[in-house]
Image (spheres, rainbow, N blue to C red):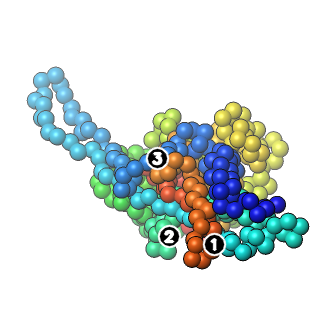
Amino acid sequence: MANSTDWARAIGTTITKYLREEEEATFRKFKVFAALQASGNVTYNQGGLDLNWQVRYRNQPVQGNNGETPRVFARQNLWVDASLPYRGYQVTDQILKKEMLQNRGQEALINVAGGMAQRLKESMEQHLAKEVWVDGNLAENSLRFHGIESMMATDGTVNVLTGEKRAANAADMFGWPSDTYAGIQTGLGAIAGGQIEGSWPNGSCDPEFDFYSPVVVNYNSESFRASTGSVTNTWADNCVVATREGVHQAKRNDTRESQIDMVIMDRSMFIAYLNKLDSKERSIVTRTNGLKSFGFNDVFEQDGVEISHEYAVPTGCGYGLSISNMELHCMQGQLMDAEGPDYLIDTQAYRYVVSVLANLKFKSPRNFFKLAALTA
């Protein structure tokens, strides 16, 4: 219990020391944050006005040569600029001097001042767990992270036969990307290029055609019936084949760094997935550096990718994540920065705040996928 000698000096030391010592625990509680930290993709003390990086959207043009063909030299611009602002969160509290004096000894049912640090930290942790998924492009989210939904909007579906864009159709497996992330449009061919053969994301296309386009799988598509043998088109019917499409279509730019590490979905979808699998089909997780190694046991494996669920994933959605292509950039020396208590002599109050200034960065939307019901 707090006593009369605890006031600003002792409580101020405790709140700062507590948050710094417990910083590691913040990441260990949540799957995506734990994976980011383990991959070394959390950086601190970042400066600058914004997060800025260059995205290469096309290759150098290649020409035929018979050994005598004249060569034409021209400068080539292969990059476009991407930019995101730093954003953050803050949680505050205060305790009046008189309240602090009252809240001590046997009369104190709750140690308000002594538990201030833990309450602020827990409140921030629970809030940050939701921000991985948020759409930071929405006007009402202008102060929130650019989570994965910031690049997953669609505008119709990809015609399964022609590859053309059309209004959402139950026959189509994939949504037509239509978003803007870090100032760059995600739509197919938004800058240049076209589909060479087949229907995207199958077949082949110019690199610039889909350099910034995520795969959005319509898990209610009728086209999955050929694989499932089902007469209906629900997530429970199509979960295995729809997830497989997302995992392998996201490998169309197959490099080690671009591979999907995990699929995280809402809890009801995860349970339906488990019910779909029997003991002979379910794969035991064999990875030594994945979610199991972080202490998460609600994980199974399909096609070498871990599948699990997380608090606050949007209802009816799942996401394929390539951790190597995700980063968390923090402006401060730690994820959560503690300030206070500051004593205000006019109001006779001790004030506390815990804040975050950071943002998530996805190197390119094409390294990620979403599972969603695009049609009824």
Location of mark 1 (residue): 349
Q: Look at the numbered disc 2 and give the secondary structure of its residue.
A: helix
The amino acid type found where label 2 is placed reads Asn
The answer to whether residue 331 is seen in the rendering is yes
Location of mark 3 (residue): 45
Verify CB contact (< 8 Å) between mark 2 and mark 1. Answer: no
The amino acid type found where label 3 is placed reads Asn
Q: Residue at x 78, y 61 (%)?
A: 2
- For the residues marked 3 and 1, what is the alpha-carbon distance in whole angstroms? 31 Å
Upstream in sequence: badge 2 or badge 3: 3
Q: Look at the numbered disc 3 and give the secondary structure of its residue.
A: loop
**Residue 116, position as x, y percentages in the image:** 70, 63
Residue 115, picture quadrant = bottom right
Location of mark 2 (residue): 141
Upstream in sequence: badge 3 or badge 1: 3
Is residue 261 left or right of 102 when viewed as pictured? left
